[in-house]
Amino acid sequence: MMKDKEDLLAPQRFTTDECMELNEVSRLNKDWRTDYQQVGAGKFKAWFDLYASSNLRFTDQYCSQGMSVSGIAPDDHVALVLPLNRGDRGVFQGREFGANDVGLMVEHSECFYRTPRNLRMMVVTIPVSRLPQALDAAAHKRELYQMIAETSVISLDNATIASLTSATRRVFEIIQSTSQPAGLALCLQEIEEHIVTTLSLVMAGSPGPARGALGRKNRLRYLERARTYIEAHLESPLGMETLTLVAGTSTRSLETAFREVLGVTPVQYIRYSRLNAAKSRLLRADSAMTSVTDTAQALGFSHLSRFAQNYRALFGELPSATLAA
């Protein structure tokens, strides 16, 4: 519980023109483990507001280009993902975010989010220890993981989605206000309790697995195995035969998993991963000691002009410009 205004941490805003820098920002947010990769073509811009109290953490974020994002909530935490875009909200865990959908993440359960252009979303990170009392009241002492065992999309009614969105927005309105009312701590505490209570009621009333959920769960498992291998072997040959052996499924099933969850084929995902890795290396490199050619070839790009063309199409600049920056 918040005792006084000194318990509040000042809100922080982070801005960046590089997608991969969002991974560093995420680590500040209770050690989230994330992998942000740009897949939408063009210059990238993002801002990320972070606010932490002694109970919860809130983020409000905007990203200009489509991304392929994977993430795992911090240990002993759950997270509520609230996309705010009208129209296209992207695909979360292989399911399109509808107008009344939210994402609910549990610890040790990886999420996959193919984001739209101009993503705007809020995320509330909640310690599991904060939930028992609210869950007891809402669900008659049912355990959290009996209600939701894995990261998933949940559909809410209009009133509930409006209530959660309004409460989360209100947190940022209060902390960004230049006038600090005497009741600031109490007001924020009450809003936090409202969010936790509402989330507990959502989990208590969450229906069982939807039709087709088992197939989706299998596809997520195949995808996770393949992605983990790809990211660890970007400098090695990455063919479909190898990936299907690693994932433990057929070529067709793996293709379906990538298309359904991330909106790309495995081959496209490998190319995006290598392009993002190339940019990360060029940004950190000493131009006197590193060449674009060496960087590209180390990551499996043998056709240098095509590499430069694909790089520019994705990031809006040539790799030589990144190295010289």
Image: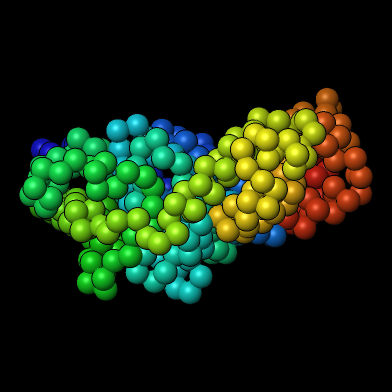
- Could you tell me residue 201's position as x and y percent? 17, 56
Closer to us: 280 or 153: 153
User: Which residue is rendered at x = 73% and y = 55% of the image?
Assistant: 314
Residue 24, horizontal then vertical, whole percent: 51, 36
Residue 155 lies, with reference to residue 26, above or below; the image says below
Q: Is residue 174 above or below residue 227?
A: below
Quarter where residue 75 is shown: top left
Q: Quadrant of the C terminus?
A: top right
In the picture provided, is 148 more to the left or to the right than 44? left
Question: Is residue 234 in view?
Answer: yes
> Residue 255 versus residue 16: which sits nearer the camera?
255
Q: Answer with left or right where residue 212 lies relative to residue 142.
A: right
Q: What residue is at 75 percent from the left and 43 percent from the top?
A: 240
Residue that appears at 48% across and 64% down: 96
The N terminus lies in quadrant: top left
Which quadrant of the figure has residue 230? top right
Q: Hey, which residue is sitting farthest top in the picture?
A: 289
Position of residue 101 relative to residue 184, above or below, is: below
Left or right: residue 306 compared with residue 151: right
Residue 58 visible from this viewpoint:
no
Q: Identify the residue at horizontal 54%, vertical 49% (top origin).
A: 219
x and y, in percent, of residue 245 in the image: 68, 35
Task: Please state which of residues 258 and 66 is positioned toward the viewer in this rendering.
Answer: 258
Q: Tell me how the rendering is colored.
A: rainbow
**Left or right for 178, reference 321:** left
